[in-house]
Amino acid sequence: MTPPVWTCNTVVSTPEDQWFDRKSFRTQGKDLAKTIIAFANSDGGTVALGIHSGQLEGLPSADQLNQFRQVGVEQVNPTVRYDLSVLDCRDEDGNPAQVCLIDVPASEQVHESAGGTCYLRVGDQSMKLNFDDQLELRYSKGERQFDSQPVRGAEDLGLAPLNTQNAEAYAGTIGARDAISALRGRHLLTRRDEVTVAAELLFGTDPQEFFPNALIRVLQYEGPRRETGRRQNIVEDIRIEGTLPSMIEEAAATVRRLFPRRRRLDDTGTFTWQATLPEDAWLEGLVNAVLHRSYSLTGDHIRVELYPDRIEITSPGRFPGLADPRTPLTIARFARNPLIARVAIDLGVGQELGEGIRRIYDEMRAGGFTDPEYRQTSGTVTLILRAEHAVDARTMDRLPRYADDVLVTLREARAPLGTGEIVDIMDVNRPAVQRALKALREEGLVTWSGQSPRDPRAVWSLPDTTLTP
């Protein structure tokens, strides 16, 4: 069916993007197939046919209409089944005109052209994938469509599990006639009008009734490490439930309240307490975790852990396919939950995973902080944002070999270390480590604490980042 947002004006004026493309009636079947394949392989989308250079073209011929209906069967492998609808309009001269709308759903399979070429939608382009990219896409398709499945246990409840007031508000946001039209138009209901996982998580009255671990825990620790037993140092442990948008809002407010601040000189020359880390960085990390976690892994929840010197955000599910967590900036745009991601964009919340990661890097670098760090286990991904300032390139050029390794060693130790301990950890000769430490001290990048130059108990540490809760 036609997504509720499309009118004769919006199909002409809406910019092409991840989910929308315009084409002429004269478009060749292979070119239309390319766009259909790209949408099906990514997050779905709509193709508007009958527009050229920003103008309505008039009426399609019978042969053109037949071609538009058959492309998904004849020129795509495996077949992509889509809805085609016709929007009746008038051109600038008042003559009858039509726009054919092809609504392509995101697919559980990987599709390619009759000639064996595979495409993926990236922004407003349909990009050809090489062999490695195709392999990664096939790996990532395994659980991508969990959010389009009906909610187990709610198959016979109709729309009862949903908060109709929230759904109606969303309908108004996207210009839909009513809540049902909005939910159907964004594929949030199955063909039998069953509530999908995405619909329940976004608009449910009580999403945790069906997904008990679809929640966020915000934990604040007193020291730089998580202690257990008698030494347990948890200051706050706040459990946040509700719909995804409401959880993001509440969790963000909680982090703002709990995370340490630092005294800084503002633009007016006054010392004020300001956030230790760029809010746009940790907020993007939080949104990414909520929108792109694996909701099919029902035994775990999202954890936001606040330490005096960093934020760690852990979410269930690995990076897509063969993506390497050591090089997160190379991760392609990806939405594990495409239906959830689409609604989030409508609501002004979140981006695809790859875009969100790039924004986190940009915000941290703009603030002069060290790059974000990602760690991946068999079932989780953790984002670590450290309140540590990066060393500028000119300074690094002046420093001797191993200086960067010394900084990493002290950063990961999170405790003062003696010269010998640093030598042992780095497995580098002592004179080289001593040269690096001396240069770092002269640049003010490390501090030395001891009673005398030959004090065997002297230690090295990173400069104090005096924070306050």
Image (cartoon, rainbow, N blue to C red):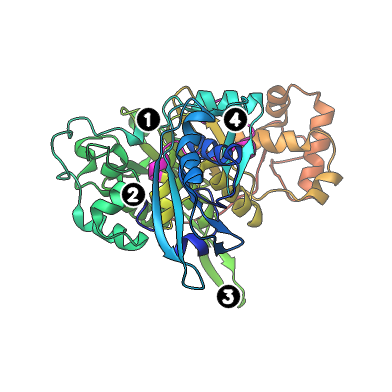
Mark 4 residue type:
Cys
The residue that mark 4 highlights is 118
Q: Which residues make up the magenta segment?
A: 319-340
Q: CA distance from mark 4 to mark 1?
A: 50 Å
Task: Decide which of tag 3 and tag 2 comes sooner along the chain.
Answer: 2
| SS for dot 3 | loop
Which numbered disc covers residue 284? none
The residue that mark 3 highlights is 270
Left or right, 73 with respect to 328, comes to left
Which mark lies nearer to you, 4 or 1? Answer: 4
The residue that mark 2 highlights is 185
Judge whether residue 376 can be spotted in this image: no
Q: CA distance from mark 1 to mark 2?
A: 49 Å
Q: Are marks 4 and 2 in contact (CB under 8 Å)?
A: no
Q: Are marks 3 and 4 in contact (CB under 8 Å)?
A: no
The residue that mark 1 highlights is 228
Residue 394 image position (x, y, % from top left): 83, 51
